[in-house]
Amino acid sequence: MNQLEKHSLSFLQFVFIIAGIQISIAVLSTPREVSRSAGTDGWITIIIGWLITIIPSLLVFKTMQRSSEGTILDLLRRRLGRWIAVLFALIMAVYLGSLAYIGLLRTLLIIRVWLLQNTSPFVVLLLLFIPTYIVAREGPKLLGRFAEVIFYFLFWLPLIYLLPMKQGRWLNLIPIVKEGWGPILSAVPGVLFAYLGFIVAYFLYPHLTNKKYAGAGILLANTITMATNLLITLVCFIYFSPNEMVEINQPVITVLKTIQFKFVERIEVIFISLYIGIYSLIWIPCLYFTAYCLKWARNGAGERSYLIGLLFLIGIGTYFFIPTFNQSDWLEHQLTKFGIVIEYILPITIWIYLVIQERLRQEGQPG
């Protein structure tokens, strides 16, 4: 049994890994971010971002059709040479490592504020490292199973946000496009942060059992992300006024306080605890792929030693300095700019180069 068969992924596992990375990284921040630029028309921006994401997503699939037995790194090594592939691997390691760090940082800050105010953040981080290492060290197959379990266990969570809608005001949404298309389009770069993560298909594609459905899988993952963000954003816009959406720091969590059951108090605490499972869908896969890229660049034997090194660096860095919510927002905005280059511009560039190279090669062959 080769490595691809050992770490094979089903279609749904492939979808859940990608959708998990996308949803977990921005589900709490998207409503407030789009409301800052586009107001209550921000839900339109989410749909526009989904439409834009379709193009690079499909080009990732079209590119990987040329390398069914290896990742994008193996394809670049064959077509562009090892040093270009190593450079790409290091860039991807930095990018995916940044995604993992942002996910861990957001989780840590929310746990400190809402759940464990008196517990040392370093202790909380160490507790998060235990399942991270257990799952990530086993590679794509266990990552797929982990994402599948989380989705099956928590698929109902976004539906809970339908409950506050009966107390909201639908009039908050009208008139549509009240300030023109300018504010809506200006919010598009920010909303693309919610769709970052489909780039991991470059590394998951060789493990997919039915590769011909990879394109449909990426589009389905993007659609799940869009639907989830759209639902939660609309609920927040309906329940909160436009001014409240800008002033409240965590509207996605705050709206949960309106849900009341006779048998439980502070239901938002329970849901935040469940959210940790969703958050883990970004830092665990991204840390694995970061370790994979570093291992590939150095032509090492395994990812586990690199994974331990990454956890050690994050732990030491967090021990000495923990960014605030505002600082994490700044990091998120910078990562959005980096992510647009990596996930939207780079796949288009790679696909165009490969197509031109193939055509030149065909024209150079004797008829």
Image (cartoon, rainbow, N blue to C red):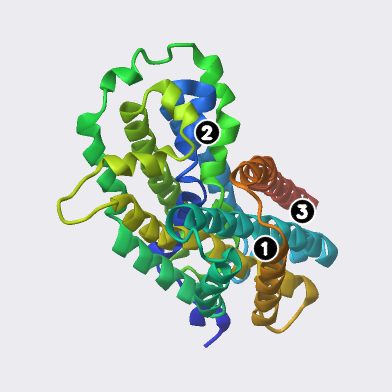
For marks 3 and 2, give the CA distance.
Answer: 47 Å
> Pointers 1 and 3 in contact (CB under 8 A)?
no
Three-letter amino acid code of the residue under disc 3: Arg
Q: Residue 5 at x, y = what percent?
A: 50, 80
Q: Nearer the viewer, mark 3 or mark 2?
A: 2
Three-letter amino acid code of the residue under disc 1: Thr
Q: Which residue corresponds to the image point at 44% horizontal and 22% vertical from the top-left?
A: 243
**Comes first in the chain, label 1 or label 3:** 1
> Pointers 1 and 2 in contact (CB under 8 A)?
no
**Crowd rating for badge 3 (residues with CA inside 10 Å; few <14, some 14–19, many 20+):** few
Q: For the residue labelled by badge 2, is the local secondary structure a helix, a strand or a loop?
A: helix
**Comes first in the chain, label 3 or label 2:** 2
Q: Which residue is mark 2?
A: 33
Q: For the residue labelled by badge 1, is the local secondary structure a helix, a strand or a loop?
A: helix
Three-letter amino acid code of the residue under disc 2: Glu
Q: Is residue 195 left or right of residue 276?
A: right
Q: Which residue corresponds to the image point at 39% horizontal and 44% vertical from the top-left?
A: 253
Q: Which residue is mark 3?
A: 361
Of the pair 140 and 3, the residue shown nearer to us = 140
For marks 1 and 3, give the CA distance.
Answer: 51 Å
**Residue 318 badge:** 1
Judge whether residue 48 can be spotted in this image.
Answer: no
Of the pair 277 and 74, the residue shown nearer to us = 277
Q: For the residue labelled by badge 3, is the local secondary structure a helix, a strand or a loop?
A: helix
Q: Residue 77 at x, y = what percent?
A: 76, 65
Q: Nearer the viewer, mark 1 or mark 3?
A: 1
Q: Which residue corresponds to the image point at 52% horizontal and 45% vertical from the top-left?
A: 195
**Comes first in the chain, label 1 or label 2:** 2
Q: Nearer the viewer, mark 1 or mark 2?
A: 1
